[in-house]
Image: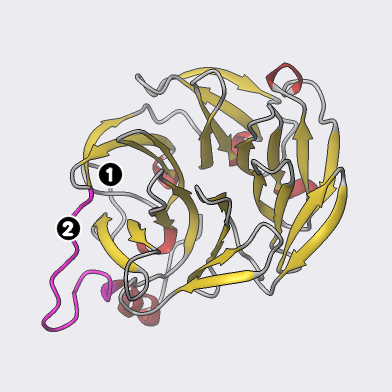
Amino acid sequence: MRKCVGMAAIVSSFVFLVPAIGQESPAPFASFDKAGPEELNDPHDLAFGPDGRLYVADKFGHRIAVLDPDSLELVESYSSGKLPGVHDVSFGPDGRIAVAVTGAGGVFVYSGLETLDIAPTAVLAAPRTEGALAHSNGRIYAMAGGTGLLIAYENGEAVATAGSHPGAHDVAEGPDGSVWVADNFNRRLVRYSPELEKLQTVDGPEFGFYGPRYLDVDTFGRLVVADQDAHRILMIDPDAEGGAVLIGVLGTGRPGKGANQFDDPEGVAIRGNEYYFSDSDNNRIVRYTVAIN
């Protein structure tokens, strides 16, 4: 991934290290638990499959890598070399799998794990897609970063669109069925109804967004967001009284490798009190456990 260069970028990065006058630095919301081996190739978003294993969109591996969530070791790969520039993977409650294949300009839809290594049952157009969601309502939502449109597909047909989000990445479902977009170029998060009516925008200096790429939503509706360019992971309560509030932050704001350090983190997956992150430029998955609620 490209690194920030130049004085302007250095100054922009520095703001994440120094809180505003009179403002305390947000506390970490989880503690470092384990780092997996550096055997992936720029891992992006990740998700738990119906078999309880961790599925990772391994971008430059052009595959879906399967990890043991306890050891974080690679145990299997699907469609190796068939998914150019893959960025996202999402499992629906009906067993279908949506995969954002950026190099192919579309979301590949598979009927289940038994077909993930064979061929998709459908390919949904989404130029420069980097986010896909197999929603509980049966629709597939695709973030077409090349056009800036969020597209809702039903039975292979586009039934609704929303924008403009050029270059946006992830699409995630909240516990209420709402659809969240990580609108990284605009440094914000946007919430939509399943019909793609805009419901909420989360932005502002209190969050310090520099490039939010991927997120997951816990059972309480809290957002856990990988802000790649800031080398941080944020937990946000979007439904707090008075508006969205920042709960906690992981990462120092500088690239690194170690406890509470990341280098261009991208993917997020939550399982109970465990948080799994793609530490992308360190080519590994790391696990944190909850510290506060």
State the residue at coordinates (30%, 35%).
273
Query: Residue 31 location in percent, x, y?
Result: 20, 41
Local SS, label 1: loop
Local SS, label 2: loop
- For the residue pair 49 and 82, the one nearer the viewer reads as 49
Query: Residue 207 location in percent, x, y?
Result: 34, 71
State the residue at coordinates (39%, 64%).
239
Q: Is residue 75 visible?
A: yes
Q: What stretch of residues is rendered in magenta? A: 14-29
Name the amino acid, label 1.
Answer: Lys
- For the residue pair 196 and 2, the one nearer the viewer reads as 196
Name the amino acid, label 2.
Answer: Ala
State the residue at coordinates (71%, 53%).
142
Residue 257, disc: 1
Whether pointer 1 and pointer 2 mark residues with C-beta atoms closer than 8 Å, the reply is no
- For the residue pair 79 and 221, the one nearer the viewer reads as 221
Residue 152, disc: none
Question: Vertically, is 87 above or below 75?
Answer: below
Q: Is residue 32 left or right of residue 51?
A: left
Which residue is the site of mark 2? Answer: 27
In the picture, residue 63 is in which quadrant? top right
Q: Is residue 116 magenta?
A: no
- Most common secondary structure along the magenta stretch: loop
Question: Vertically, is 225 above or below 200?
Answer: above
Query: Residue 286 location in percent, x, y?
Result: 34, 36
Cα separation between marks 1 and 2: 19 Å
